[in-house]
Amino acid sequence: MILGRVLGPVVATIKHEAYANRRILMLDRIDPAGKALGGYLVAIDAVDARPGQIVLVNDEGSSARQILNSTTAPIRSVIIGIVDDIQVEA
C-alpha cells in the first residue's frame, strides 16, 4: 500500500479499453507525515478522490485487477481509500 496526495486528473483521448469510463489521477507519493517522497504515481480512482486529498493506493497489478473485476486489464494501481487521519505511534 502507498500513501499519495491527489494532484489532479490525467486526460487521454486515446487509451486502452480497460480505462474507458474510469477516472485516472496523478498522485504525489508521500510519507505518513505528509512529506513528498519525490515520486509520482498514476492510478485509477475507485473512490471519487479529489485534488489535495490523501489517498491509499493498491500498487500491485493482480490485486488492482481484482478490485476492478477484470482479470486481463493492464492496470497496476488503484486508489482504494481516502485517508481521514494518520497516527504514528513511537
Image (cartoon, rainbow, N blue to C red):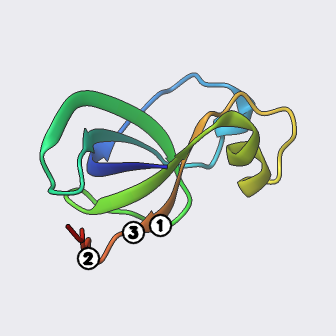
Query: In the figure, 65 relative to 34: above or below?
Result: above
Q: Residues within 10 Å of mark 1 (few under 14, many from 20)?
A: some
- Identity, as a three-letter code, of the amino acid under mark 1: Gly
- Identity, as a three-letter code, of the amino acid under mark 3: Ile
On residue 22, the disc is none
Which structural element holds mark 1?
strand
On residue 85, the disc is 2
- Identity, as a three-letter code, of the amino acid under mark 2: Asp
How many numbered tags mark residues here?
A: 3
Asked whether, in this view, residue 72 is left or right of residue 15, the answer is right
Query: In the figure, 70 relative to 84: above or below?
Result: above
Which structural element holds mark 2?
loop
Q: Position of residue 20 (x, y in %)?
A: 66, 41
The reply to whether dot 3 and dot 1 touch (C-beta < 8 Å) is yes
Specify the quadrant of the image occupied by residue 46.
bottom right
Q: Position of residue 52 (x, y in %)?
A: 19, 58
Residue shown at 24%/71% (left/top)? 89
The residue tagged 1 is 81
Q: CA distance from mark 3 to mark 2?
A: 9 Å
Q: Nearer the viewer, mark 1 or mark 2?
A: 2
Asked whether, in this view, residue 37 is left or right of residue 55, the answer is left
Asked whether, in this view, residue 60 is left or right of residue 52, the answer is right
Residue shown at 28%/50% (left/top)? 6
Asked whether, in this view, residue 19 is left or right of residue 77, the answer is right
Residue shown at 62%/34% (left/top)? 76
- Quadrant including the C terminus: bottom left
Specify the quadrant of the image occupied by residue 55.
bottom left
Q: Position of residue 39 (x, y in %)?
A: 27, 27
The residue tagged 3 is 82
Which structural element holds mark 3?
strand
